[in-house]
Image (tube, rainbow, N blue to C red):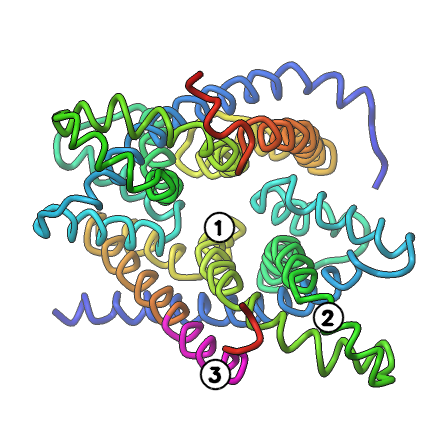
C-alpha cells in the first residue's frame, strides 16, 4: 500500500507539471492569438501577411515537429531552452495560431453598425476596438477558446517525449518500475479527463458572465 | 547551424520510406474514424438511454484525454489481455478511435441538418428504420459533411508523428533515428516540418474547393437529381 502511495505521489508531481504547462501555455497562446488575430485584420498589408504566414505555418506543421524543432534545432542557433520553456513556446505558438483564426472571425462577426456607431460617437480606432467591438467579440470567442484550451492540455502529453517529467512521463516511470501498465495509465487518463472537465466547466461559467447584458445585442 | 545538402540527399530515401508509413497510417486511421464515428453518432441518437449514455460517456472521455496516453494504453495493455498487435495496428486503432469521437460530432450535425419532414415522409411511406437511414437520411446528410471530414483527415495526418512513441517507423521516427545516429538534428527535423507544411498548404486549397463544391448551401437539393 505504501508503495502505491509513493507512486501516486510521483504521478501527482507530474500532474503539477502538466497543470503548469497548461496554464502558462494558455496564457501565452491567448496573448499570441489576440495579437495575431488583430494582425490578420490590420490596416497594414505587411502586418496582415506576417500574421497569415505565422498562422499557416503553425497550423500546417504538427505540434510534435514544432516541439522537437524548438528543443533540438533552436540550440544550434544559440538559443537553448529548458524542456519547460520549449514546451510552453511550442504549445503556445501552435494553439495561438488556431486561436488567431477564432479571434479574427469573432471580430468580423460583430455587426458593422457597432463600428459605425463608434465612429459616429467620435471614438478613436483604439477606443472602438477596446470598448465596443472586442468585448462583444470576446463572448463569441469563448466557447472555441475553451475547446482550444482542452486541445492544449492534451498537447502537453507530448512534452514527455522531450524528457519533461509531466504526468505521462511519470506514468511511464511507474510502469517501468512496477511492470504494471493498467493502473498508472488508467490513473492519468482519469486525471486528464478531470482537468479537461474543469476547463470546460470554467469556460461555461465565464461564458455566462461575459455574455451578461449582451443578450439583446446579438440576434 | 549550417545546412548540409549532401546530408539531405543522403537521408531523403529513408525519410520517404517513413512518409509512406505516415500516409498509410493516416488513411487506415481515417477509414476507421469515418466508420466508428458514424456508429457512435447513431448510438448517441438512440432513444434507449442504456445505449446513448455510454456512447456519450465514451465520446466525452476520449475527447478529454490525450491521444498519446491512449496510444500507450492500447500498446501496453492489450498484450496483457492476450491481444498482441503490431505497433502500426495499435497506432491506427488509437488514431482512428480518437478521431471517431470528432467525426461523430460532424455526423451529428449533418444528420440534424436533414429537415424533419424527411423523417416524417419516410414514416408516411412505411419505410423501416434501416431503410429510412440508408435511403433517405444518409444520402442527404453526407455531402454537406465532406469538407468537415476532410478537415479531420488533415488533423489526423498531423497527429501521426505521435505514433513514433509506440515504435511505429513513420516519418518522425525515421527522422529522429537519423538525427540520433548522425547527431545532426537540423536537417531531418526541418525536412519533416517542410513535408507537413507542404502537404497542409496543398490540402488547404483542396478543402476550399470541397467547401465550394459541397459546403453549406452549395447544390443542396440538386444532389439527388
Q: Residue at x 47, y 83 (%)?
A: A209
Q: Residue at x 21, y 45 (%)?
A: B45
Marks 2/3: CA–CA distance? 24 Å
The relative height of residue B117 versus residue B136 in the rendered view (above or below) is below
Residue at which label 3 appears: A209
Question: Pointer 1: what residue?
Answer: A158
Q: Are discs 1 and 2 located on one and the same chain? A: yes
What span is in magenta? A201-214
Relative height, residue B62 to residue B203 (above, below): below
Whether B53 is drawn above or below A149: the answer is above
- Residue that appears at 68% across and 18% down: B12
In the image shown, does B51 or B122 lie closer to the viewer?
A: B122
Discs 1, 3: same chain: yes
Q: Chain of mark 3?
A: A
Discs 1/2, front: 2
Which quadrant holds residue A68? top right
Q: Please state which of residues B166 and A19 is positioned toward the viewer in this rendering.
A: A19
Residue count near mark 2 (Cα–Cα under 10 Å), binned few <14, some 14–19, many ≥20: few
Q: Is residue B73 above or below residue B84?
A: below
Relative to B164, B80 lies left or right = left
First in sequence, mark 2 or 3: give its number: 2
Q: How far across and down, in percent of the image, does residue A189 sit?
A: 29, 56
Residue to which mark 2 is pinned = A113
* Percent position of residue B27, x then y: 45, 22
Mark 1 neighbour density, 10 Å: few (under 14) some (14–19) many (20 or more): many
Specify whether residue B116 is painted magenta. Answer: no
Amino acid at each position: 500500500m505504501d508503495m502505491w502511495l509513493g507512486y501516486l505521489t510521483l504521478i501527482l508531481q507530474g500532474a503539477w507539471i502538466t497543470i503548469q504547462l497548461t496554464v502558462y501555455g494558455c496564457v501565452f497562446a491567448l496573448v499570441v492569438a489576440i495579437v495575431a488575430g488583430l494582425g490578420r485584420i490590420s490596416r497594414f498589408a505587411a502586418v496582415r501577411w506576417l500574421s497569415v504566414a505565422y498562422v499557416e505555418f503553425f497550423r500546417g506543421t504538427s505540434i510534435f515537429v514544432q516541439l522537437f524543432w524548438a528543443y533540438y534545432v533552436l540550440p544550434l542557433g544559440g538559443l537553448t531552452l529548458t524542456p519547460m520553456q520549449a514546451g510552453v513556446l511550442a504549445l503556445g505558438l501552435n494553439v495561438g495560431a488556431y486561436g488567431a483564426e477564432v479571434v479574427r472571425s469573432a471580430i468580423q462577426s460583430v455587426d458593422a453598425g457597432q463600428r459605425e456607431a463608434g465612429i459616429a460617437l467620435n471614438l478613436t480606432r483604439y477606443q472602438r476596438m477596446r470598448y465596443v467591438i472586442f468585448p462583444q467579440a470576446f463572448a463569441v470567442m469563448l466557447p472555441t477558446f475553451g475547446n482550444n484550451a482542452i486541445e492544449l492540455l492534451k498537447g502537453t502529453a507530448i512534452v514527455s517525449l522531450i524528457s519533461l517529467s509531466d504526468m505521462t512521463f511519470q506514468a511511464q516511470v511507474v510502469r517501468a518500475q512496477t511492470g504494471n501498465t493498467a493502473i498508472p495509465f488508467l490513473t492519468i487518463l482519469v486525471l486528464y479527463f478531470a482537468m479537461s472537465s474543469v476547463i470546460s466547466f470554467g469556460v461555461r461559467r465565464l461564458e455566462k458572465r461575459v455574455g451578461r447584458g449582451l443578450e439583446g445585442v446579438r440576434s | 547551424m549550417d545546412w548540409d545538402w549532401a546530408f539531405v540527399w543522403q537521408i531523403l530515401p529513408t525519410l520517404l520510406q517513413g512518409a509512406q508509413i505516415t500516409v498509410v497510417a493516416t488513411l487506415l486511421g481515417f477509414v476507421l474514424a469515418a466508420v466508428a464515428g458514424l456508429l457512435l453518432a447513431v448510438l448517441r441518437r438512440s432513444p434507449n438511454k442504456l445505449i446513448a449514455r455510454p456512447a456519450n460517456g465514451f465520446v466525452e472521455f476520449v475527447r478529454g484525454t490525450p491521444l498519446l496516453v491512449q496510444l500507450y494504453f492500447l500498446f501496453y495493455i492489450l498484450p496483457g489481455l492476450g491481444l498482441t498487435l503490431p505497433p502500426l495496428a495499435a497506432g491506427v486503432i488509437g488514431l482512428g478511435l480518437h478521431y471517431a469521437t470528432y467525426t461523430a460530432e460532424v455526423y451529428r450535425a449533418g444528420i440534424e441538418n436533414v429537415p424533419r419532414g424527411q423523417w416524417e415522409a419516410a414514416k408516411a411511406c412505411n419505410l423501416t428504420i434501416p431503410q429510412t437511414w440508408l435511403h433517405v437520411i444518409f444520402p442527404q446528410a453526407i455531402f454537406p459533411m465532406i469538407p468537415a471530414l476532410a478537415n479531420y483527415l488533415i488533423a489526423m495526418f498531423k497527429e501521426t508523428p505521435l505514433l513514433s512513441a509506440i515504435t511505429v517507423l513513420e516519418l518522425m521516427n525515421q527522422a529522429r533515428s537519423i538525427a540520433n545516429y548522425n547527431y545532426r538534428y537540423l536537417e531531418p527535423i526541418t525536412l519533416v516540418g517542410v513535408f507537413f507544411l507542404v502537404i497542409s498548404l496543398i490540402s488547404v486549397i483542396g478543402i476550399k474547393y470541397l467547401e465550394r463544391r459541397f459546403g453549406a448551401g452549395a447544390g443542396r437539393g440538386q444532389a439527388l437529381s
